[in-house]
Amino acid sequence: MPNDLVAALDIGGTKIAGALVDSGGGLLARVQRPTPAQESAERLRATVDEVVGELAATAHWHRVGAVGIGSAGPVDAKAGTVSPVNIPAWRDHPLIADVRARAGGLPVSLIGDGPAIAAAEHWQGAAKGRTDALCMVVSTGVGGGLILGGALHSGPTGNAGHIGHISVDMDGDPCPCGSRGCVETIASGTNIARRALESGWRPGPDQDATAAGVAASARAGDPVARAAFGRAARALAAAIAATAALVELDIAVIGGGVARAGEVLFAPLRAELERYATLPYIRHLELTPAATGTDAGLIGAAAAGWRLLGERVA
């Protein structure tokens, strides 16, 4: 049954994952490697080659009709290149050409990791059936994508919805993107932990100095840990409300490692959103956790591959 599968690649700052995915969103095979984010472009390319090569070695590869890639960005879908903020060696790196060569000439589609997560949540997750949605990932970085008019809106270059680089503090810290006070500089897991440490928080004996450790302390009532999450929630709420004011949204979906903190994040986020989302047409914006979990990037990348084959799955 040729062309009844697509290959999906999820490329981020910590992992490069691959899978074969059917038209119902089912994953038939998985491959994952750590991202050598601080190494050379050649080493990064070799890691992608390993992932694609392992997928190509499966018994199902002959059924694959296209490859979809969701990559940390910014990306340039027109040029086929990526320049991820958190992967310094890749600047205007020709990722589509690399993957097409390794995949035997199959057609390849590229979108940012934020739009990939939006596609996943619209196809299989919390935004399924919704017309207008913002879907976010809050993890090592902060990204997002938009569903507008019932379809993924990834923009001309594949980056639309990149909410992590909306500035919410004009005098804030410099961001690796070149701006200042971006949501990511406040609300990413890395920066939640940094803020807590700078304010005097220290992990307990069974914790580490990460956002997960800060969340555990916040859950136990530590005021410094709670303040770090409250500050992150304020930044996220300001950006969500601004996005909703621009494009009118039904729902905002939040996923990623930081979102796994649960009510430690969502309770202050709901409270802050009430403060910022004050216009009548955004006052009742729904806020909910993502449903596709750690597979979101792969599912969204697969959606991009299916669109190359004429299937609108998200």
Image: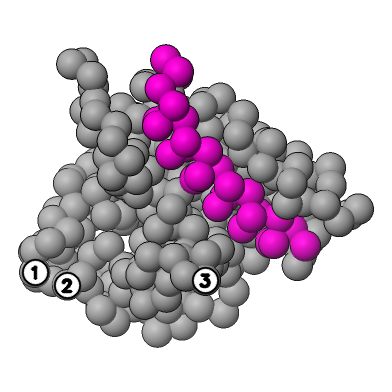
Q: Secondary structure at mark 1?
A: loop
Q: Which residue is mark 3?
A: 170
Q: Nearer the viewer, mark 3 or mark 2?
A: 3
Total numbered circles:
3
The furthest residue to the bottom: 79
Q: Which residue is mark 1?
A: 40
Task: Give me the residue at 31% from left, 74% from top.
Answer: 83
- Sequence-first disc among 3 and 2: 2
Give the overall secondary structure of the magenta segment: helix
Q: Which residue is mark 2?
A: 89
Comparing 51 with 14, the one in front is: 14
- Sequence-first disc among 1 and 2: 1
Q: Residue 204 appears in which quarter of the rendering?
A: top left
* Rendering colour mode: one colour
Q: Secondary structure at mark 2?
A: loop
User: Which residues, given as a range, are shown in magenta?
Assistant: 219-245
The furthest residue to the right: 280
